[in-house]
Structures are given as structure tokens and as C-alpha cells.
Image (cartoon, rainbow, N blue to C red):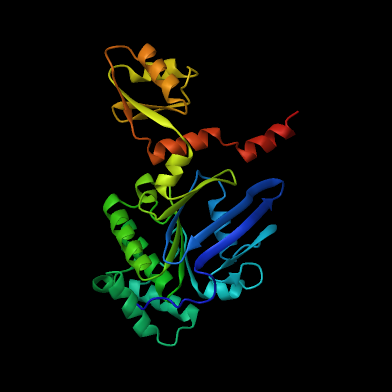
Amino acid sequence: MSAPANGKGNGLAIDVRGLNKHFGDKHVVSDLSMQVGRGEIFGFLGPNGSGKTTSIRMMCGLLTPDSGEGTCLGYDIRTESDEIKRRVGYMTQKFSYWDDLSIRENLDFVARVYGMPNRREAVDRALEGLGLATRAAQLAGALSGGWKQRLALAACLLHEPELLLLDEPTAGVDPKARRDFWEQLHQLAARGISVLVSTHYMDEAERCHKLAYIAYGRLLAQGTAEEVVASQNLSTWSVEGDDLAALSTQLQGAPGVEQTVAFGTALHVTGRDARVLADTLARLAGPDRRIEQTQTSLEDVFIHMMSGAEDNMAARKGKEAP
């Protein structure tokens, strides 16, 4: 598959400012501004119901924002959505192809929908490019989750898009299939294809060139993984030893402690004031537990940001309560 054309624009695949979307009286996306570079893998993270899918749909012209503006591949998201759709591959988290058709038949059908003049060549190219050629005659309904995912990606790439929008594409897929999938994404990015991918997996987030974290409709942080971690100014200590559940309860509300999270056989204790946090742990953890400062992880940061975010739906319900 050849590299995509450069198209219109200023070197950005996505450039949006101040996007807002309401459904009824719920403010689903609030003042979202984002930039995704060409050939960049951009991770979009956040809890379920945070507005990720709505944001993705607005950024590629599938959903009109209530306010805000921007471009996708150099085309206006409000007035040139048809041009955007021709140049974007969109992969939803739910497998949506036909179980009673083979892999080749599924891809051929998609090629017909796109009105591609050289369908057979395009399908052959997709089969080879995604390692599906030996399974071309297999029914889609008999595929495992990882192979279904590969079929879905092949279908997205048939029309040689400049941008891939992937909505939690690895949900329910085994670790090896997830790793293989991400290797494929990096190969695509190396050819100049931009990727915007939503995920819940921290190991996947760390493989992105840049990240954005959205919670309850608001963008809380964006940048490289290192920049996102540094922006929160958190200190984290790892505590190992007996009865960590009791210690976690004891530390709730203690000076300097902002969150405690169990990580395997250790308890991660996080806060902004490193000195106060260290004093609290020295006083409460006791001499029989091992205490050491550790590097704040992306997961520590996201849990911290989530704990401080306001649930827009809960707030709305609260106002309606008598």
C-alpha cells in the first residue's frame, strides 16, 4: 500500500478548537481543543462515558458540534465532511462485518461500497498487507477476536486513508494480538498515516507518540507520556509488607496523601507534597514495611486525574434532586 497523499493543510491531520456538544441537558464534550500531527499516533484516553467517541465523531465530520471549529486533513469539519470521510478509515470497537461471508468476501463488499475501480487488486493488497492471505476463504464468524480485529483494520485501509480513527480497537483481544496490532499501527505511521486511537490500556498509551486524557467531557491533559506525567507534579512512594489494605485505609486523608492504589504486592501512595508525604509514611507505615520512592507512572497520573474530575452527569442529577 502506498503512502497517503499530503492533501490540504498545515502538517496537521486534526486541528480543532473549542468543540462543544450537548445531548439534551448533558454537556458531553466541553471546549475540546486538540492537534494531531501527520504520521502521528495519538492516544485518546478516558473512562467510559467521558465523551471520547463523541469527540472522535466530531473531529472527523461524522457529528456536527454545537460550537467550535477546526479541520481534519485540511478540510473544514462543518462544511467539508464528505471530503473528510473519503480520506478517513473509522474502526469501531464492535466488530461489524458479516459472519457468514469469508474474509475476502467481506473485503470485496467493502470495496464495492467505496466504489473502488480495481477491487480485486485492492483486496489482494489488503490481505497480504495484514497477513490475511492464508485465511482469505475462512468465514468471518469463525475468527478469533484478534483475527476479526485484523480484518476490521484491513477493511479500514482498503481505500488508502490518510487518517485512521480507532475506537477502542483492542477491547477483548488477547495480549499477543494487541502487541501485533500495535506493531502494525507503527508501521502505518512510519508511512505517514495518522492514527487517533482511544484505549483503556496503559501499555498501549505508552506506545503512542502523544496522548490526551478526557474525563466527563473535559480535556485534562495532553502531550507526550513524559509531559503528561510531569504536568501533574506528583510524588509516588511504593510500600511493601503485610496488611497493605489496612494501611491504605489508615492513610486516607492523612497529610500529603492524595491517593493510594494497590499494584500487585505493593501499595502506591501519591501526593503533590513530597516532603509531607514522606513524613506521613515514615510515621504510619511502620518499621516492618519496605518504603521507597518510585517513579510516578502514567497509570498513577490517570487515576489521580480521574479522582479529581467532576462527573457531569452526577452533577446534573444533583441539581434536579429535590
Vertical comparison of 99 with 250: above or below: below
Q: Position of residue 174 (x, y in %)?
A: 30, 51
Left or right: residue 154 versus residue 48 is left
Asked if 195 appears above or below 275 in the picture, the reply is below
**Residue at horizontal 26%, vertical 53%?**
176
Q: Quadrant of residue 18?
A: bottom right
Image point (36%, 50%), residue name: 204
Q: Quadrant of the N terminus?
A: bottom left
Front residue (pair 31, 116): 31
Q: Looking at the image, how many numbered discs can be counted on the residues? A: 0
Furthest toward the left, the residue is 134
Q: Can you give x and y, in whole percent of width and height, for residue 278 in the image?
A: 39, 20
| As drawn, 309 above or below 273 | below
In the rendered view, does 70 fall on the left or right side of 184?
A: right
Q: Residue furthest right?
A: 322
Q: State the image coordinates of residue 172 (x, y, percent, origin top left).
A: 37, 50
Is residue 151 in sight in this rendering? no
- Identity of the residue drawn at 33% across and 58% down: 182
Quadrant in the picture for the C terminus: top right
The residue lying furthest to the front in this view is 275
- Viewer-closest of 213 and 47: 213
